[in-house]
Amino acid sequence: MNSLHELCEVREEVFDPSRRDTVLDLTDLIEDRINARRFFKTNYVTNGMSTLLREAFDRFSRQSQQGTFLLNQAMGGGKTHNMIALGLLAKNPEFRDEILEGYHDPNLGKVRVAAFTGRESDAPFGIWGAIAEQIGKKQQFSDYYQPLQAPGQKAWENLLQGEPLLILLDELPPYLNQARAKEIGNADLATVTTAALSNLLVAVGKPPLENVCVVISDLTATYSEGSQKINEALDDLKNEADRGAMPLEPVQQNTNEIYHILRKQIFKSLPSDNKIQEVARGYAQSVKDAKQMDVTDASPEEYARRIQEAYP
């Protein structure tokens, strides 16, 4: 039986200290700091990601009524990764055939992308100002900056209509938690932001924005660092999103997707199925021998199956 070192080739970048602790976020996407070719070389398309990509590109081509998507998963579950994958495909048409396998409109060019991560808690003109600036229409929303006030549904329609557009909203709970400390009249920035985003979600469901897609990451009802007030704001926004959003789980925890993701990220090449089965049989024989000596009560057959699924 061959060793793991003999059967698997590890990607060189796994040993690169400069990349080992890199965690990408939406700011990297907007500022074009992500190498799309390198990203997709190690990207595994899960069922959740496949659904998101296909539905979004149907939307950009005006082939779908579904315009809002809510990514639900615990921390580290791939929400930001899915957003970045979609954003890179929107901005880089040359990768679509490979990733979408032809499931897209070949005549669709670059898609406008606006993104906001809640870690940018010092955005001077709110989330709506950041979106307006990224699509080159900052002045169109100037009436909503001083003082900060929520754009209404019609204002959003007027701002966003035109060419296909993708809006990505990530890490909203910590942003809203910080925003509650900024008073605006008799309210605060968290309340105003919740109203603005609720109006955005309603606007996306209207005909003028039928080629606009909004993707929001988890709006958990209980934000551990927030007060009752911020949790109520999140509940209000989640209720608005739930009315029209398609919920998606980026990585299905009860499947083998996590193994596929790790394989793609770590290994450049893997052995054939026959070689993997040979390894599994070797482990099964060892378990069988141990069972005969009353060292374990594990099932050799079950162990072999799990080895095949998880290898390496």
Image (cartoon, rainbow, N blue to C red):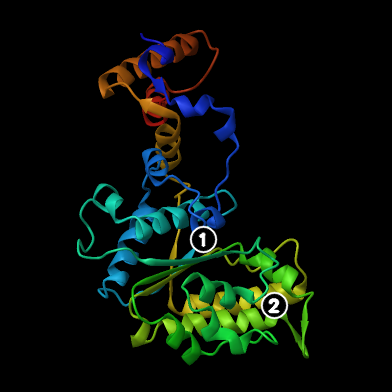
Label 2's element? Answer: helix
Residue 108 spot, x, y in % from top left: 25, 65
Residue 111 spot, x, y in % from top left: 35, 66
Q: Nearer the viewer, residue 265 or 245?
A: 265
State whether residue 59 appears in this view: yes
Q: Nearer the viewer, residue 76 or 33?
A: 33
Answer with mark 2 or mark 1, whichever residue precedes in sequence. Answer: 1
Q: Which of 237 and 164 is in front in this view?
A: 164
- Image label count: 2
For label 1, count other residues whose C-alpha is less than 10 Å away and answer few (under 14), some (14-19) or many (20+): some
Query: Compared to 28, does 218 lie above or below?
Result: below
> Do labels 2 and 1 touch, CB within 8 Å?
no
Query: Compared to 227, does 153 lie above or below?
Result: below
Q: In this figure, which residue is indicated by the disc labeled 2?
A: 190
Q: Which residue is drawn at 60% across and 90% down?
A: 143
Circle number at residue 72: 1
Q: Which residue is drawn at 65% across and 66% down?
A: 173
Q: Residue at x 40, y 54 (%)?
A: 88
State whether residue 150 appears in this view: no
**Left or right relative to 312: residue 144:** right
Quadrant of res 309: top left
For label 2, count other residues whose C-alpha is less than 10 Å away and answer few (under 14), some (14-19) or many (20+): many
State how far apart marks 2 and 1 are (Cα). Answer: 21 Å
The residue under label 1 is which amino acid type?
Answer: Asn
Which callout, 2 or 1, points to the residue nearer the camera? 2
The residue under label 2 is which amino acid type?
Answer: Ala
Query: Compared to 33, does 159 lie above or below?
Result: below
